Image (cartoon, rainbow, N blue to C red):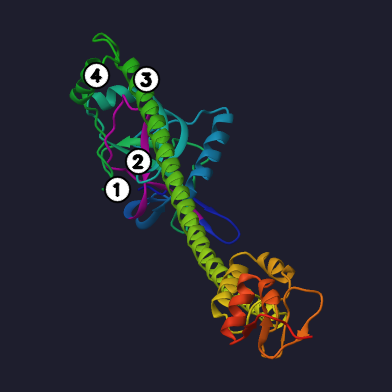
Amino acid sequence: MILQKMFRSITRKRMIVRAAFTQSLDVEQPSIVFMPEGEHTITASVDGKPSTITVTVDPRVLASFNEDLDKRKESNVRPFGGFDHEKGAASFIPLEFRYEDGVGLMLDVEWTKAGREAIEGKDYSYFSPSFLIRDGIPFGLPKRGEVGSLVNDPAFEDIPRIAASNSQIHSNMEHLAELGLISPDTKEEEALVVAQSTLDELKEKAAKVDELEASSVQAQEEYEAKTASAEEELADLKIAHAKLKEEYEEMMKKMKMSSESAAEAAVEDAVAAGRIAPQDEEARAFWKQSIIDKPESAKVLASMPGAPVLDGSTILAGRAEAREMSKELVRSEFDQLNGTEKMAFVKAGGTIVDNASE
């Protein structure tokens, strides 16, 4: 690498560096690796003196190189690539810088006739850029002179060698013809355009595939999230259902207890009113269950007329008045009793007499 000139700013020193790269030059390719990516320790010409320096190349170098190239394009003297960093014929015309991850700083070029012939004739195999450097970081182009040259003495040894490969070019063209992208008589320049267009199209399709894959992954994630949410909601509903069922069963239990208590009270009221004989357990059980099953049965029981009180002193025979008896009834009074009353009277040990005494 050749350091041509030293520039000084207020706080930092910048230098012009020239260094050849071992990259493969191909006149059919519209770009060259201007500087390889990464950190490199190289022996170059720094301000015209051989020197070993460390150069770091990363995406941040791109902007300053394009700015300097644009400025030089606007000047009266066009920017150009030379031979051996000497004055003379131009090997190429620089068009634009770009950065390619994993490769480095790229320069799109238009090869001149002299440059094309030098490469195809294998007179030159490497490219050597001219650039400004400050604190190990390249930051632009020299204000005048060539932006780089074809040389035969590389400084960066980890870049592909620059050499025109006609056999490879022909092989690629044959492959393009087999794919039906070009005809057998297509010129190399046209084939290059077709190849680049096909490559761009493939890249676009690959980008769409990546986009679809990303959308598919996103859709799958959303589906899984909704499924998980639905499962959580279902689990919550099951818990709520179990709780409601428990509360319902508890309520029904209380209602049953309340119903049984109400039925028991209605039966006892009926017994006290003489509607059911105290000793008639069968009647008690019947009316209690009837009221539990159909609460309106309590009204039926309450509407029944009171029967004689079978306590050994007074018997009501369904008449408006009662009379004192000593566990006995005359036949006419007994006949006025209903079946339940008659059964209750007999169970109580009552006696039936033929004639009633006044």
Q: CA distance from mark 1 to mark 4?
A: 33 Å
Q: Residues within 10 Å of mark 2 (few under 14, many from 20)?
A: many
Tell whether label 2 touches label 4 (CB within 8 Å).
Answer: no
Mark 1 vs mark 4, foreground winner is 4
- Residue 15 inside the magenta-drawn segment: yes
Q: Residue furthest right?
A: 320
Report, in whole angstroms, how far the alpha carbon at label 4 lies from the one at label 2: 29 Å
**Helix or strand or loop: what does disc 1 sit on?**
loop
Point 60% across, 80% down: residue: 344
Q: Label 1, label 2: how many angstroms apart (C-alpha)?
A: 8 Å
- Of badges 1 and 3, nearer the viewer stands 3
Labelled pair 3, 4 in contact (Cβ < 8 Å)? no
Kindly indicate the quadrant of the structure image that contains residue 53: bottom left
The image's mark for residue 173 is 4
SS at mark 2 in the image: strand
The kind of residue tagged 4 is Met
Q: Which mark is residue 155?
A: 1
Residue 133 percent across, percent down from the top left: 46, 52
Q: Secondary structure at mark 4?
A: helix
- Which region of the structure is painted magenta? 14-40
> For the point 66% across and 81% down, which residue is it?
268
Near-viewer residue (4 or 228): 228
